[in-house]
Image (cartoon, rainbow, N blue to C red):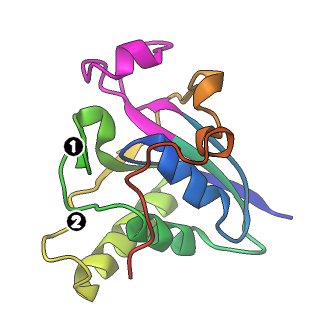
Amino acid sequence: MKLNRIVVAGGCFWGLEELLRNFKGVTLTKVGYTGGDYDDPAYSDVKTGMTGHAESVWVEYDESVTSLKDILHYFFKIHDPTTKNRQGNDKGSQYRSIVFYRDQEQKNLITEVIDEVNDMGRFSDPVTTEVSEEKEFYDAEEYHQSYLQKFPNGYSCHYERA
């Protein structure tokens, strides 16, 4: 097993986590907050949209089973990357579409995949997903972790697009 990770955000983290957890080769997911300048934020802080954090999903995967490129293409399939600061009914910077890179190689691959998604013409508008250097990831409160496993009929605006 060769483990690697990526942190993505694209709306409410409950639905993203649930879909990503079931993607081939994913070994661990957790939800949290990253991308802001406020230390150790809580949901009550992040939901205001004033901390700069995004509701994010930490995705650990086995590179012997899947690739970062495959995960990124799936990520762009399970949310709408063309709406700035919005997914479904969720509005605000905390719901923005963003991918956090750890090194130049990841950054290059992320931008390559964004170009591929734009070239596919899957969406009528261009991808607005941000690409940003990874910042500290703060785990969300326990009740947010695996939320849709605990509450299968809970809210989600995420689904797999054709």
Q: Is residue 42 left or right of residue 143?
A: left
| Residue 152, image x, y percentages | 61, 48
Badge 1 amino acid: Asn
Q: Is residue 87 left or right of residue 61?
A: left
Q: Quadrant of residue 127?
A: bottom left
Identify the mark at residue 127; answer none if there is no mark.
2
Circle 1 or circle 2, nearest the eye: 1
Q: Quadrant of residue 80?
A: bottom left
Is residue 129 something that shows in the picture? yes
Badge 2 amino acid: Val
Q: Is residue 145 above or below residue 161?
A: above
| Residue 52, image x, y percentages | 30, 26
Q: Which residue is mark 1?
A: 85
| Residue 74, image x, y percentages | 49, 71
Q: How many marks?
A: 2
> In front: 66, or 13?
13
Q: Is residue 18 above or below residue 126?
A: above
Label 2 CA crowd tier, 10 Å (few <14, some 14–19, many 20+)? some
The quadrant of the image that shows the C terminus is: bottom left
> In front: 120, or 147?
147
Is residue 7 something that shows in the picture? no
Residue at x 63% of width, y 73% of height = 67
Give the magenta part as a residue range: 32-56
> In front: 144, or 60?
144
Mark 1–mark 2 distance (CA, rounded to whole Å): 12 Å
The quadrant of the image that shows the N terminus is: bottom right
